[in-house]
Amino acid sequence: MSFKDRLEEMGRRLEKLLRDLPDHAGVSDTLDYVVGALYGLERAVDLKFVDRPGESEATYRPFLAKYVGDIIEGKDVNKIWLAGFYFNSAGVHPSWVAHRGDVA
């Protein structure tokens, strides 16, 4: 089963949970973060995310300044950077749930 297939399966299971579980703020808030994580992973896969093997190279930093310029000018951002952004965002969503005292 491909990773994309696994994401689709997770999406179906998440959709079922959202339909079946009680409409409780803690449940909805928690699953909202999971929806965000699923979306981040789906976008990362769609943009062909590839994890880098270690620290970024010294030549990488100047590109970050360009990406910031592209972002504030409303231009399209480098797809490799964007894939990493979505992947990292997906990883952060579950940690937000753990830090919320009013959820669960």
Image (cartoon, helix red, strand yellow):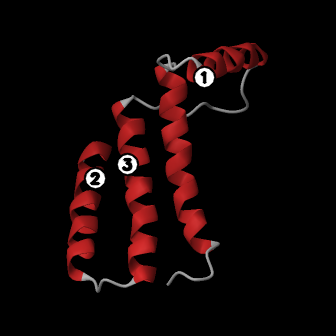
Q: Which one is earlier in the sequence, the residue at label 2 or at label 1?
A: 2
Identify residue for label 2: 6
59 shown above or below 23? above
Seen from the viewer's position, the closer of residues 44 and 104 is 104
Q: Which numbered mark, 2 or 1, is in the foreground of this view?
A: 1
Residue 26 image offset from top left, x and y in percent? 45, 81
Foreground disc of the pair 3, 1: 1
Q: Position of residue 32 (x, y in %)?
A: 41, 65
Q: Disc 1 on helix, strand or loop?
A: helix
User: Which residue appears at 42% of the width and 81% of the height?
Assistant: 25
- Numbered badge on residue 72: 1
Number of other residues with Cα within 10 Å of mark 1, as a class: few under 14, some 14 to 19, many 20 or more: few
* Label 3 secondary element: helix
Indicate whether 84 appears above or below 22: above
Residue name at image x 37 percent, y 48 percent: 39
| Residue pointed to by mark 3 | 39
Q: CA distance from mark 2 to mark 1?
A: 35 Å
Q: Secondary structure at mark 2?
A: helix
* 1 over 33 or under it: above or below: above
Mark 3 residue type: Tyr
